[in-house]
Image: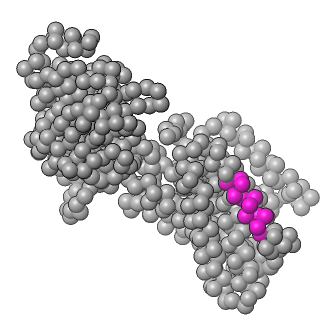
Amino acid sequence: MTTLALDRLSVRYSAVDAVRAVSLEVKPGEIVGLIGPNGAGKSSTLHAIMGAAPVVGGDIRLGGDSLVGRRSEDVARKGVALVPEGRRIFAELTVEENLRLGLAARRTTTNGDVLHDAFELFPILREFRRRNAGALSGGQQQQLAIARALVAEPDVLLLDEPSLGLAPRIVDVVFEALARIRERGLAVLLVEQRAQRTVALADRSHVLANGALRLTLGPDDAADTDRLIAAYMA
Amino acid sequence: MTVAFLNLSWPTFAEALSLGGIYALMAVGIGLVFGVLRLVNFAYGQLIMAGAYAIAYSSQWGWPTWGGIMLCFAVVLALSTAMDWLVFRPLRGHSPAVMLVATFAVAFLLQSIAVLAFGQLGTVASSIGPLNQPWDIGGVLIRKIAIVSIAIAAFCLVLLQLLLTRTSVGLHMRAAAMDFRTSRMLGVRANRVIGGAVLISGLLAAVSAFMLTARNPQVTPIFGLDETIVVLAGVVLGGLTRPISATLGGFTIGFASGILGGALPTDQSQYLPSFLFGAVILVLIIRPAGLFTRGDVAMERL
């Protein structure tokens, strides 16, 4: 298991600075939250890690290696998995085919039921494994997206707003799953709009605004609404 | 003897079926590359032309038929790989319009090379001429090449379907055609998927070249051009975004032109292409995403 570290990472789309000198670290067995208003640079940070956004400064390190300048597929094959915003499941493929796509980035070849762990975490997927993924509900699709990322057996899991558009009951399912994923020893970087829940779950949460880190909060700060609001307004 | 419900002769039916099969292979060859590159390869016909010349010249050199077929495969695969490396790869990520125009340029370049190297008048692939002789099937005479084409097309399509649905590289190809960016983030190797699609597309071009040459052994620099234009219409008719819909579109237009070509008197069959294109336009007005797609397919482009 390896640590993901951003060191003064900067991302720029033509003239727009999306991320400015952001530094943070996610260790194995940790959930680190990244919260902030729309357009703060949260997704850009994740895309930069995945090699899909232009990095103009700083470094992204996985263990001893730099990920800057690598192609998306190579980052995935180094052990970083992304659960993208909007889930991005393949609606015309079956649930099982979606999960098998996750095997593309797997570094070890294992025999037996390669999807066993995914089904254990989200039993509903086993039941619907032959269905087209497009026929699943939003919450089921989100579980599929997370399971697909985990099938790759990554060291680092990046999640981009996994609770977006989900009913509160389903949000509970997703957040409980994240807690169990942490227990498996993965390093989890969680981008979220639901600030309070994220702060409560994560080992620490960074507030991002205008592309820069403003504040770092611990689980005890979750009840401190004033401090959260102040950070968003800063 | 006739096919009762269509009031058509069995030979016409077999010819139409075989033309549909060949066009289906060409359509899926074009569709696979479109899927992963968003590139409509207009130069596909010139790949077939090159393969046809390989068969024709090997026949003139006195090579055995199988030798000519091997040379056809070698030439078409080498050419399609060269196309990928010299044209598609450097232009990858550019707009579809840029890539389409580039394939026009490649098409005319290859055609001009053929004119300069082999002359306008063309040459005859005599070694596979015997395939044009008829088989007597229960008193009905059907050209051997019609039967052979149907069998080969069916075999190739079944094989392709198994590859796309039962192997991981096939799964990766289908996923890349639906959403390339997400596929790459899941670890699907872009170069391998594109290289695989170009390779299969080339193999299908070589198979099509063999069957078209057997149907019409007179090989000229514009060999395969008309067929490619009709197949492109068929691919658009079926729907470009999925191999299966492109295949059905290619088959439909090939089968339809075979039936109509056989049914119409000779003096009217020259209007056949215009009629086909008119029908394609009508279909696309009613179903813009294609005949064999489910609803509107909104494509995510890079």
- Image point (41%, 60%), residue name: B169
* Foreground of the two, B41 or B178: B41
Q: Is residue B222 visible?
A: yes
- Image point (42%, 43%), residue name: B181
* Foreground of the two, A23 or B141: A23
**Residue sticking out furthest to the right:** B267
In this view, A139 is above or below B108? above
On whether residue B104 falls in the magenta region, the answer is: yes
The magenta stretch is B103-114
In this view, A2 is above or below B61? above
- Work out which quarter of the rendered image holds the C terminus of chain A and state it: top left
- In the drawing, does residue B233 fall left or right of residue B123? left
In this view, A175 is above or below B81? above
Question: Which color scheme does this rendered protein use?
Answer: one colour
Magenta stretch prevailing secondary structure: helix
**Residue sticking out furthest to the left:** A220
Q: Quadrant of residue A127?
A: top left
Q: What percent of the width, then of the height, locates residue B22?
A: 65, 65
- Image point (23%, 27%), residue name: A34
* Foreground of the two, B54 or B31: B54
On whether residue A210 falls in the magenta region, the answer is: no
Q: What percent of the width, then of the height, locates residue B26?
A: 63, 61
How many numbered discs? 0
Q: Quadrant of residue B24?
A: bottom right
Q: Quadrant of residue B2?
A: bottom right
Q: What percent of the width, then of the height, locates residue A125?
A: 25, 43
- Image point (33%, 20%), residue name: A210
In this view, A142 is above or below B204? above
- In the drawing, does residue B251 fall left or right of residue B110? left
Q: What percent of the width, then of the height, locates residue A44?
A: 35, 32
